[in-house]
Image (cartoon, rainbow, N blue to C red):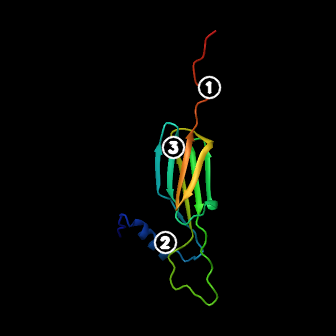
Amino acid sequence: MFVIPVSRHSADLSRHIERLFNTDQDAVALRSPALDVSETDAAYTLQLDLPGVAKEAVKIKIEGRRVSIDAEQTRAAEKAAGERVLYRERSVTRFSRTLALPQELNKSDSTAKLDNGVLTLTLVKRQPDNAGELSVS
């Protein structure tokens, strides 16, 4: 039996375990990015950490109340002729996160911005159509 400690360094432990058991150098690691969610009366704001990801590599899908975010880091430049890698910790990482929010979203009014490795989504809440009273005739 062995114990796996859970602490703020669990990501480092995960990376070490992954390195021990992964022999494929071209494998892509899958990570769930850290996420903050806040809301106003009109919209939800999501912030996700996506270090090393270009904005062209981010895919956001909105379906009703469900939001899916997928992103992949670009592969590092190839080594120069005569150069050999002595040690490598950095690998290509794919980030993926899906969540359901309490209210349906309006895709056309929502925005996304990637700045310094932080993706900020402003997801506008869909307003009910034809809300109001029905008159009786």
Which mark is on residue 18? Answer: 2
Give the residue pinned by disc 1. 130
- Looking at the rendered image, the disc whose residue lies closer to the viewer, 2 or 3, is 3
Q: Amino acid at mark 1?
A: Asn
Residue appearing at x 64%, y 88% in the figure: 81
Quick one: SS at disc 2?
helix
Instruction: Tell me if mark 1 has few (under 14), some (14-19) or many (20+) residues whose alpha carbon lies within 10 angstroms of its own.
Output: few
Quick one: SS at disc 3?
strand
> Residue 63 appears in which quarter of the rendering?
top right
Q: Nearer the viewer, residue 40 or 104?
A: 40
Whole-angstrom CA distance, mark 1 to mark 2, is: 53 Å
Report the number of numbered marks. Answer: 3
How far across and how far down the image is residue 129, in percent?
Answer: 62, 29
Q: Amino acid at mark 2?
A: Glu
Whole-angstrom CA distance, mark 2 to mark 3, is: 35 Å
Residue placed furthest toward the top:
137
- In which quadrant is the N terminus drawn? bottom left
- In which quadrant is the C terminus drawn? top right
How far across and how far down the image is residue 87, in percent?
Answer: 50, 83
Quick one: SS at disc 1?
loop
Which mark is on residue 44? Answer: 3
Does label 1 or label 2 sit earlier along the sequence?
2
Does label 3 or label 1 sit earlier along the sequence?
3
Instruction: Tell me if mark 3 has few (under 14), some (14-19) or many (20+) residues whose alpha carbon lies within 10 angstroms of its own.
Output: some
